[in-house]
Amino acid sequence: MNWELMWDSVPTLLGGIPVTLELVGLALLFGAAVAFAAALLRLSGNPVAERLMAAYVFVFRGTPLLVQIFLIYYGLGQFEAVRGSFLWTFLREPFWCAILALTLNTGAYTSEILRGAILSVPQGQIEAARACGMSRTLLFRRIVLPIAIRQMLPAYGNEVILMVKASSLASTITLLEITGIARKIIAQTFAVFEIFIVAGSIYLLLNFLASRLIRYAEWRMTPYLRARG
Amino acid sequence: MFELLSFGPNGWGGQLLGGAAMTVAVSLSSFALGLVFGSLGASAKLSRNVVLNGLAEVYTTIVRGVPELLVIYLLFFGGGGIVMAIGRVFGYEGYIELNAFTVGVVSVGLISGAYSTEVIRGAVQAVPHGQIEAARACGMSRWLILRRILVPQTMRYALPGLGNVWQLTLKDTALISVTALAEIMRVAHVAAGSTRQPFLFYTTAAALYLVLTTVSTAAFERAERRANRGVRRA
């Protein structure tokens, strides 16, 4: 063990945190929007929309994220039409390609979590809301969505941790986030274990914080389950 | 365009199929290794030994909390060093190099094993305690209880969870393309580079993975139906 080298690598590796957090944060944000739209379309009753969304979920859950990243980063640039369009300002940047791939990936998984949560809302609650004279949108906004979001939080917490880990794949398309930097230092110094320990600890810390955050959100959303003090 | 995917002299069809076979081989070996790690991990977690509990807890926390790519880098760059260090303990001073297949199987197996540990632990705990008491009352030894009561039922309870682990394992093998092992992703990457048709080859790779995941979903569904054939449904 080379303690000095390990200690020296800490600030360099910590420098990768902003990129990792940007990747995860933006992908989760856009992914939530995609998931919301996909889940609603999947439950819309329109057979064409349902089929399309089922196909989207099937493809993105059935293939490795690495294929999706490479397909977007290397694959799309092959077409003259893409390179000529305004999209090229985004798609030639590995950062936005990674964001796009991560967004579509987490969108597919999250839409299934959300769909399950919406379906699990007790029928009695919906009937009661209807009996109160709520419109469809009001019923969805006030009754179905809050219950569904509360219901999906534990599963969504797993998805957040998966995303933190998945962001490491952005290093394969030249992005220097934590794993990318770790790989670079390993190639220069051959200090595999030292770097693994430091980089791994950073990821463990990030995941620990993420799971705490979700746990806190769950606690905030279930005041009725807490013992009255 | 389709000539590139054909099996002719200019086609990559043969290599792609070879890559798919390699992916299946690596996945099956890693999954099997993962089951070994998983069974060991689960029995460590369920034992009353504090040291074993702690070790298994550390194993699953680290491997499940750190990106798969980092674990693969650890063994890819550091695996030879570990093996040589072990060799030195036994008095072997020479240079040992691990091939890409071994590195891939061990690293994905380690990852797969951490998830299997939790699945198997849950399945063991799902076996009703009364069954074990009944077996003990019949005078069965610990080993016999394990073989006749615990393992057959655990397998049934663990099957859906292990199906998920298998899908994860299959998709994780794409990551060992960084070690230049000629599985689907690596072949697609090389083909994309030399033909300048990345979209075509990565789409083909995606399609191959979809075929593999679809077939294995169906296989696990059949296995579950078979395992549950003696169970009354509500």
Image: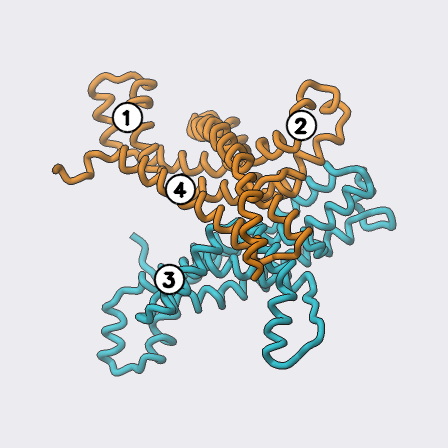
Disc 2: which residue: A91
Work out whether disc 2 and disc 1 sit on a shared chain. yes
Secondary structure beneath label 4? helix
Q: Which chain is orange?
A: A
Disc 3: which residue: B121
Mark 2, Cα crowd under 10 Å, few <14 / some 14-19 / many 20+, is many
Work out whether disc 3 and disc 1 sit on a shared chain. no
- Give the residue displayed 60% in from the left and 80% down from the top: B90
Q: Nearer the viewer, residue B111 or B130?
A: B111
Can you say which quadrant of the picture contains the N terminus of chain B?
Answer: top right
* Circle nearer the viewer, 3 or 2: 2
Seen in the picture, residue B158 relative to A160 is either above or below; the reply is: below
Image x and y of residue B106, in percent: 58, 63
Seen in the picture, residue B141 relative to B213 is either above or below; the reply is: below
Disc 1: which residue: A143
* Circle nearer the viewer, 2 or 4: 4
Whole-Å distance between the Cαs marked 2 and 1? 40 Å
Label annotation for residue A209: 4
Label annotation for residue A156: none
Earlier sequence position, callout 4 versus callout 1: 1
Secondary structure beneath label 2? helix
**Which three-letter amino acid code belongs to the residue tagged 4?**
Leu
**Which three-letter amino acid code belongs to the residue tagged 3?**
Arg
Residue at the limit of the structure toward the front, as seen here = A4
Earlier sequence position, callout 2 versus callout 4: 2
Q: Nearer the viewer, residue A9 or B43?
A: A9
Whether label 4 touches label 3, CB < 8 Å: no
Mark 1, Cα crowd under 10 Å, few <14 / some 14-19 / many 20+, is some
Work out whether disc 4 and disc 3 sit on a shared chain. no
Chain letter of the residue carrying label 3:
B
Image x and y of residue B206, in percent: 65, 43
Whole-Å distance between the Cαs marked 3 and 2? 44 Å
